[in-house]
Amino acid sequence: MQTHEIRKRFLDHFVRAGHTEVPSASVILDDPNLLFVNAGMVQFVPYFLGQRTPPYNTATSIQKCIRTPDIDEVGITTRHNTFFQMAGNFSFGDYFKRGAIELAWTLLTSPVAEGGYGFDPEKLWATVYYDDDEAAQLWQEIAGLPSERIQRRGMADNYWSMGIPGPCGPSSEIYYDRGPEYGIEGGPEANEDRYIEIWNLVFMQNERGEGTSKEDFEILGPLPRKNIDTGMGVERVACLLQGVDNVYETDLLRPVIDTVAAIAPRGYATGNHDDDVRYRIIADHSRTAAIIIGDGVTPSNEGRGYVLRRLLRRIIRAAKLLGVDQPVMASLMATVREAMGPSYPELAADFDRISRIAVAEETAFNRTLAAGSKLFDEAAAATRSSGKTTLSGSDAFTLHDTYGFPIDLTLEMAGEAGLSVDELGFRELMAEQRRRAKADAAARKHAHADLSAYRELVDTGPTEFTGFDELSSDARILGIFVDGKRVPVVAHHARVHSETPPPERVEIVLDRTPLYAESGGQIADVGTIAGGGSGGTSRAAVTDVQKIAKTLFVHRVNVESGEFVEGDTVTAAVDPKWRHGATQGHSGTHMVHAALRQVLGPNAVQAGSLNRPGYLRFDFNWQGPLSEQQRSEIEIVTNEAVEADHEVHTFHTQLEKAKAMGAMALFGEAYPEEVRVVEIGGPFSLELCGGTHVHNSAQIGPVTILGESSVGSGVRRVEAYVGLESFQHLAKERALMAGLASSLKVPSEEVPARVANLVERLKVAEKELEKTRLANARSAAVNAAAGAQRVGKVRLVAQRMSGGMTAADLRSLVGDVRGKLGAEPAVVALIAEGDNGSVPFVVAVNQGALDAGLNANQLVKALSPAVDGRGGGKPDLAQGSGKNGSGIDAALDALRAEVARS
Ligand code: SER
């Protein structure tokens, strides 16, 4: 049966049953959370949620759907398509489970001559959500399905949502058994290639909230009405009704494969699996690309455009790897139009545009590939002439990085050239690049990637820094930049609408400024730039200052009122409170550095530092952690030097002279001929430094070392609070101690002894508790053994144990019980509601039962689904854990049934 006919029968069936036929929505709906429409129900979401009143009570549609998360699976499995057609019927508070099951069953099993699909009812299976007795019952009643062809499954398989907040509910899926040549039996639970899902009936009754996976999201509550949402995979039904092996060979996809096979040196289905996958990729992606372009997407580097670009490029590569050396896109698009046009007239109507866009991407990508091939030939020749047979990882990396060559293409080309490729080296370089990109992104506070715009100003000379002597200076605006582009003027924008785009990156360069630019570990000053036009009321807040080419200070600003024009005279001012804190932080850093060297010696060499108001950190080379005593000594030396109220003295001198005086400099840093030296307490602290400092050390205030930690091999870090922050930190600790003392009802100084005493008593109590637990477990074992039932020739203990038992408890118990049951065939299954909502279970089987053909592993598989669990083990002892305590009884029932069957 052709796809066109399958679609028609579906719609006719539901229209006959009173449904309104609704056309497919575009694959792009106005929902930023949803890249593409991925289910038939998407256009109906407001009806399900009760936000809008549907103009009909029941509807039917065949929706164009795109799902791209599984893109790498395409062609490898037989059932993944990035584009597929979902046939669905929907009830908005009209019929519910019974109606949905009846309607689906009739269409699937009615004879072809009577308008149905004519599936053999004996080959159909159903799954239901594990506690959905009603649906299971309906399958028996309506379809006459025997209970062993109705499987119960958990959240991941049988609870449907869009993957984002919206309507959701338990589902029931219909599967078709393709027969033993497709794999082991045991229903969909055992094998989803042999048992292929064709239809999903969702009993849409709840609303879901945010979540992290298919199994983990909040259910916000019931929907206003009970609804039905079903989705039948048209491609999968076509695959079955056309008797082909996989969806790629159905009537709408196969022509694409044939188009490629006509021009490729190697054919389809000639025994080369890799080639077949490539053919299927081309067939699947061509169709998806045409549909997406048809709905208005063009190739780009982000979002939907990126998905499209990726699809098109994967087609081109797959064709190359098949050995096709001519452009393919135009003929692929034409084939898609022929196959799909009858159902999707928009593809035919808009064909020229669709084809033009796809072909343009192919042309551009082929240019890149051609340049890369040239490089490849050179690299291959160089490899051979140096007597090697392996293309280096770095060549493969360059091909990937510069020319977009995927590694499989390089491998293929190398293979043809009689070479292998250092794949490991390639992967290391890729990983290295990813690490670098991450570090770069973190380090680059300012997107000054393109410095050319600032070049002219850098050339006019350095910004004069006035901030050592004053906190406010008059200055002239030399340049204004918005998003890295030079502009003559920038004005305040009132944000009238909430959809006004976020503010751009606005920067101002002045001829002189008192605002310190981040350097030497000291972060930038904050402050204001004021004056300018509009009668002097213009104002901008300076949020950051960075240096370009070490000389040009660039102020990042938010324009709060008025406007700024290049050439204006303005007043730039530092926030005095901020600066006070910044000087404390920076001078504090010098003090900690000096104290550290005094305590640890000259090997504690500075490796980096960062300071801001109230806080500092200092990294230094040192092996192993500091002792508590060293840490405390450093703190004491620092605070004594603060207390001594040393004068802070700064001066300029020749680099050589400063070094001769013993001034600390950062190893590897390039210093100018003339340097600035900051001296605190004479020889106590002498450093080359361009930062801002207090005048006297007492101004730093108390310094509290917070801790010391490792930041990489051989590098340690101390962190400290200074000034008021330091005091506040100590006050908080004092309050904490007072709270502890009061809850322990002892004076503060007795807290340590009291806690030690409590810990000791707790240990004793835990031992006692353990003894009692063991005794309880032993008597539980005796009771359990006594409660054995007889199921056939087997003695069965299937019990729910008291709460809080761990898997280890159950394991030891299960052995005890089994021991007490003697040599007759016996099975012991124990299950408990453990801690944190876990549901541990263990099944043991004795030799007699093993001989009778029972297997603990199988029994665990039988009981797990009802508690949403997984497990396994050996034939005589298997265990697992579930997540759903309310299914324990059902799990035990399932186990009993399984034992009875054996
Ligand atoms: N929404 C369900 C699915 O996509 C049924 O239509 O599977």
Image (cartoon, helix red, strand yellow):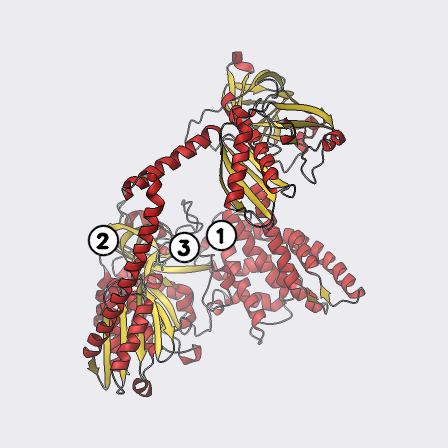
Which residue is under mark 2? 93
Which sits earlier in the primary sequence, circle 1 or circle 2? 2
Q: Position of residue 609 (x, y in %)?
A: 58, 37
Q: Nearer the viewer, mark 1 or mark 3?
A: 3
Instruction: Check disc 1 and give the amino acid type.
Output: Ile
Q: Position of residue 307 (x, y in %)?
A: 52, 52
Q: Residue at x 45, y 31 (%)?
A: 725
Q: Residues within 10 Å of mark 2 (few under 14, many from 20)?
A: some
Q: Is residue 16 above or below residue 900?
A: above
Identify the image quadrant of the N terminus: bottom left
Q: Is mark 3 within 8 Å of ligand 1?
A: yes
Task: Describe the element under mark 3 as helix, strand or loop.
Answer: loop
Q: Is mark 2 within 8 Å of ligand 1?
A: no
Q: Residues within 10 Å of mark 3 (few under 14, many from 20)?
A: many
For residue 742, which quarter of the picture? top left
Identify the image quadrant of the C terminus: bottom left
Horizontal side of 116 relative to 378 (left or right) equals left
Q: Position of residue 496 (x, y in %)?
A: 42, 26
Which sits earlier in the primary sequence, circle 1 or circle 3? 3
Instruction: Check disc 3 and give the amino acid type.
Output: Asn
Which residue is under mark 1? 292
Q: Position of residue 823 (x, y in %)?
A: 27, 87
Task: Describe the element under mark 2 as helix, strand or loop.
Answer: loop
